[in-house]
């Protein structure tokens, strides 16, 4: 998993509450257990015209001004619905490194940290200000500093955010669940050796 320390990127606004995981990545795309191949399906209900693969020019992801966006701005309860971890996978594969919202569904929020996406909660008043500034400013970009737990706007205003110290640490180090487990490789090996002595019947085929 790629470490997250600082990130500067264009922001794409998604001015909707209760964006569920099926809207983020529809179930029809969940045919693989790998973490790749989901970018095409990101927001496909809104991204393409009904019944076709023709991009809908009215959806933000298809607008030229947001074509290189790597930060997503949303409203409340982002990532609600089913617990599919494919939702943050799709966001990450498309190129989003940060999602900023007033609130997140808990499971989606937790899943983001396992793939290297930083979810940031900000007060609704701050979210509204950002939406207004993005609308008025083509190419609007934010600078996110995880170590400082801050988001710097183009006008110099800084928004601070809270994050659990453990989750902050794993993002800074780029450690997914497998990598975190492998940190204890020596202890795991020692336990396996000890187990073969204490309970050898486990190894009987």
Image (cartoon, grey):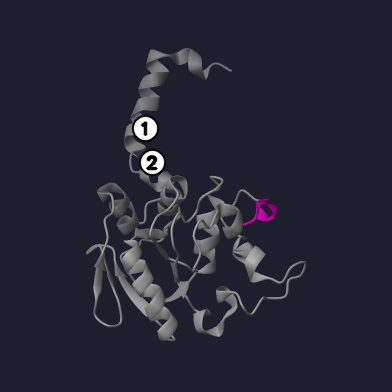
What residue sits 36% from the left and 74% below the top?
130
State the residue position of label 2: 181
Q: Is residue 190 above or below residue 141?
A: above
Q: Nearer the viewer, mark 1 or mark 2?
A: 2
State the residue position of label 1: 188
Quadrant where the C terminus sits is top right
Label disc, if present, on residue 63 of the rendered structure: none
Q: Position of residue 144 (x, y in %)?
A: 31, 69
Quadrant where the N terminus sits is bottom left
Q: CA distance from mark 1 to mark 2?
A: 9 Å
Residue 149 in which image quadrant: bottom left
Is 7 magenta? The answer is no
Task: Residue at the far right: name it.
Answer: 51
- Which portion, as a residue range, is magenta? 25-31
Sequence order check: which comes first, mark 1 or mark 2?
2
Cβ atoms at labels 1 and 2 below 8 Å apart: yes
Q: Position of residue 193 (x, y in %)?
A: 38, 25
Is 30 magenta? The answer is yes
Q: Is residue 95 above or below residue 186?
A: below
For mark 1, give the secondary structure: helix
Q: Position of residue 41 (x, y in %)?
A: 64, 63
Q: Position of residue 70 (x, y in %)?
A: 45, 72
């Amino acid at each position: 998993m790629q470490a997250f320390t600082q990130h500067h990127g264009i922001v794409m606004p998604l001015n909707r509450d209760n964006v569920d995981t099926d809207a983020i990545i529809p179930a029809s795309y969940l045919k693989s257990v790998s973490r790749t191949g989901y970018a095409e399906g990101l927001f496909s209900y809104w991204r393409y015209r009904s019944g076709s693969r023709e991009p809908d020019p009215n959806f933000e992801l298809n607008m030229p001004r947001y074509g290189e966006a790597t930060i997503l701005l949303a409203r409340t309860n982002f990532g609600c619905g089913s617990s599919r971890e494919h939702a943050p996978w799709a966001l990450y594969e498309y190129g989003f490194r940060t999602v900023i919202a007033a609130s997140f569904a808990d499971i989606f929020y937790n899943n983001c940290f396992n793939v290297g996406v930083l979810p940031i909660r900000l007060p609704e008043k701050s979210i509204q200000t950002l939406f207004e500034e993005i609308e008025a400013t083509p190419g609007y970009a934010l600078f996110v500093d995880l170590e400082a737990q801050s988001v710097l706007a183009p006008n110099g205003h800084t928004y601070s955010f809270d994050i659990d110290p453990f989750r902050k640490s794993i993002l800074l180090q780029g450690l997914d669940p497998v990598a975190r487990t492998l940190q204890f490789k020596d202890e795991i090996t020692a336990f396996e050796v000890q187990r073969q002595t204490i309970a050898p019947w486990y190894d009987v085929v």
